[in-house]
Image (cartoon, rainbow, N blue to C red):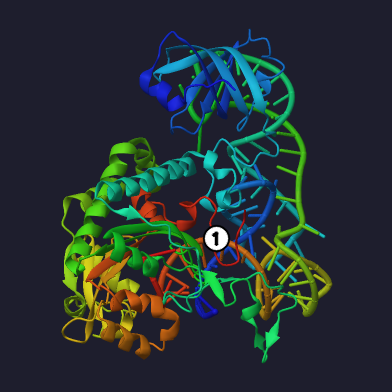
RNA sequence: UCCCCGGUAGCUCAGUCGGUAGAGCAGGUGGCUGUUAACCACCUUGUCGGCGGUUCGAGUCCGUCCCGGGGAGCCA
């Protein structure tokens, strides 16, 4: 097929009085005396190209006049300065080719605002709307920015496995992976005989690539994994998915301080990149989705993140004079309302809470000298809560083994993980960034199901 | 999983005290117009989420199930 310029390029370069061909989908058509105005978009940018289709076109009465929202067409003609308001340039068509019709009586997308809830039911078409198309472009850009950030800093990307046979990675319910016939499960002593399963033992979809990333951090120095992650939790909220993308950097010869520095630098980099490269999309979100978006993004860029210990956070909450639904006490995990108070009311900017009680954090987090807390950090963003969770890892074999035993974890199945401490162990640290939550923050989108193309949530995989 | 709210035309919603259903938009037809969420006139569209109950009569009241949204928990 003929290679045609993208509309984004045309709108930027404005090659006036030249013959060009554009291909895309119709956003809307308005008829006037002797001509039709076609709003054409090809997905390259939010703005579309206005195409003028005169009545004199060979197929005007047979095709052009029948065009409606959603139709796929090509338009060839001259790009000229537009005499009317609303656009700088427009294409005066000499030829219109219809690739695909979109019968208006059945095409779900109308020339009007739809609720995000409705658009979820047509997930395969919603990328054609202004807002969801903009989300997709921001998502792509942020994904690229993540790669840039780490590659520029000498990190290596590790493709950690999606299928895991670890009994538990300590991060919630897992999806089982099996090739057994579920109608006729092989039994042994009344239980399923996984020795006859594909891997010879129970297997699941990963809930985190961290443990594997640690192995390669202790080989290549600084690494990151970035890929799909799965949680079989029955979570029904606007910030949880059963399948989501998680970024997990892991650094050797690094402590909690360095971990926090990297996380803060990354978050600022991503937002700055978005502001610089997705200006048109952000303008749309600011106008229709979240009026405070520019101020919130600016707020992150301009300020150092507040860093305070869990112990100090508890003190702040106790001194706040607030009546919380869940009372605050040292040793109890911070509730959403507490996190929100810290980030949104008290400090009004991102907050990093460190050194949580070891009893409420996973086994792999490094025990501090007080023997009561661990070198953990949670980054709380105003509006969406926890966006990053990380820690310095426990690199001491004896301490790690003891903590795993306390947690009731079968050491035998973690020998490889313990080997990392047995042979050439070093202080190391890392964190996990929920990619969709990052997109939510960058776009102001309220529901996480609207920042991933095909969301998977309990009881729902629409497409 | 728990709490709250909701499910009525293709979409967004209204529907009073229980008396068999309406608006805007979309769609269709015609008109007008360098239009831009185009405009004007006319027209079409319903298992009122499912099942059961109360009642002479249920969109409306009760029970139950399903689905969706918000919040909570879990977390990223």
State which quadrant residue A30 falls in: top right
Q: Where is residue A155 in the image (x, y as percent from the top left)?
A: 29, 53
Foreground: A18 or A296? Answer: A18
In percent of the image, x 35 and y 43: which residue is there? A286
State which quadrant residue A194 falls in: bottom right
In percent of the image, x 23 and y 71: which residue is there? A426
Q: Position of residue A394 (x, y in %)?
A: 27, 77
Q: Which residue lies furthest to the bottom in this view?
A: A189
Q: Which residue lies furthest to the front in this view?
A: A423
Q: Which chain carries label 1?
A: A
In the image, taking residue A436 as reference, residue A254 lies left or right, namely: left
Foreground: A388 or B58? Answer: A388
- Residue A287 visible here: yes
Task: Give the quadrant of the N terminus of chain A.
Answer: top right
Q: In this view, does A145 lie above or below A460?
A: above
What residue is shown with label 1? A456
Q: Residues within 10 Å of mark 1 (few under 14, many from 20)?
A: some
- Circle 1 SS class: loop
Q: Position of residue A125 (x, y in %)?
A: 59, 43
In the image, taking residue A428 as reference, residue B26 lies left or right, namely: right
Q: Where is residue A10 in the image (x, y as percent from the top left)?
A: 42, 21
Foreground: A134 or A403? Answer: A403
In percent of the image, x 43 and y 30: which residue is there? A47
Q: Is residue A452 above or below residue A72?
A: below
In percent of the image, x 23 and y 48: which residue is there? A298
Foreground: A347 or A264? Answer: A264
- Residue A291 visible here: no
């Amino acid at each position: 097929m003929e290679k045609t310029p993208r509309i984004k390029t045309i709108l930027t370069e404005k090659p006036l009085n030249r013959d060009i061909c554009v291909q895309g989908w119709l956003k809307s058509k308005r008829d006037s005396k002797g001509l039709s105005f076609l709003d054409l978009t090809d997905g390259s940018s939010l703005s579309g190209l206005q195409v003028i289709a005169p009545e004199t076109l060979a197929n005007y009465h047979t095709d052009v006049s029948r065009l409606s929202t959603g139709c796929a067409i090509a338009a060839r003609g001259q790009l000229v300065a537009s005499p009317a308001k609303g656009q700088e340039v427009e294409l005066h068509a000499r030829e219109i080719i219809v690739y695909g019709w979109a019968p208006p009586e059945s095409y779900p997308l109308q020339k009007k605002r739809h609720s995000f809830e409705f658009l979820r039911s047509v997930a395969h078409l919603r990328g054609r709307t202004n807002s969801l198309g903009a989300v997709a472009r921001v998502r792509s850009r942020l994904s690229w920015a993540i790669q840039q950030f780490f590659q520029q800093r000498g990190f290596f990307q590790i493709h950690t496995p999606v299928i895991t046979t670890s009994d538990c990675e300590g991060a919630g319910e897992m999806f089982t992976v099996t090739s057994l016939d579920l109608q006729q499960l092989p039994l042994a002593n009344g239980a399923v005989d996984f020795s006859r399963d594909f891997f010879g033992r129970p297997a699941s979809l990963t809930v985190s690539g961290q443990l594997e990333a640690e192995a390669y951090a202790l080989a290549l120095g600084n690494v990151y994994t970035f890929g799909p992650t799965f949680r079989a939790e029955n979570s029904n909220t606007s910030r949880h998915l059963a399948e989501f993308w998680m970024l997990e950097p892991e650094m050797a010869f690094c402590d909690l301080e360095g971990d926090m520095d990297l996380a803060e630098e990354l978050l600022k980099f991503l937002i700055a990149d978005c502001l610089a490269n997705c200006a048109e999309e952000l303008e749309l979100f600011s106008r229709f989705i979240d009026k405070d978006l520019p101020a919130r993004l600016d707020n992150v860029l301009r300020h150092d993140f507040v860093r305070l210990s869990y112990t100090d956070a508890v003190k702040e909450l106790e001194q706040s004079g607030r009546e919380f639904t869940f009372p605050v006490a040292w040793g109890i995990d911070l509730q959403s309302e507490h996190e929100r108070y810290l980030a949104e009311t008290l400090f009004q900017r991102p907050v990093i809470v460190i050194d949580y009680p070891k009893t409420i954090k996973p086994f792999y987090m490094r025990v501090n000298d007080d023997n009561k807390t661990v070198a953990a950090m949670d980054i709380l963003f105003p509006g969406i809560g926890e966006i990053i969770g990380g820690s310095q890892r426990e690199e001491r074999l004896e301490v790690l083994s003891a903590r795993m035993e306390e947690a009731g974890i079968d050491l035998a199945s973690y020998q490889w993980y313990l080997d990392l401490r047995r042979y050439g162990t070093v202080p190391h640290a890392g964190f996990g960034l929920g990619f969709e939550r990052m997109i939510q923050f960058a776009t102001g989108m309220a529901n996480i199901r609207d920042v991933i193309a095909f969301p998977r949530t309990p009881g729902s995989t629409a497409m």
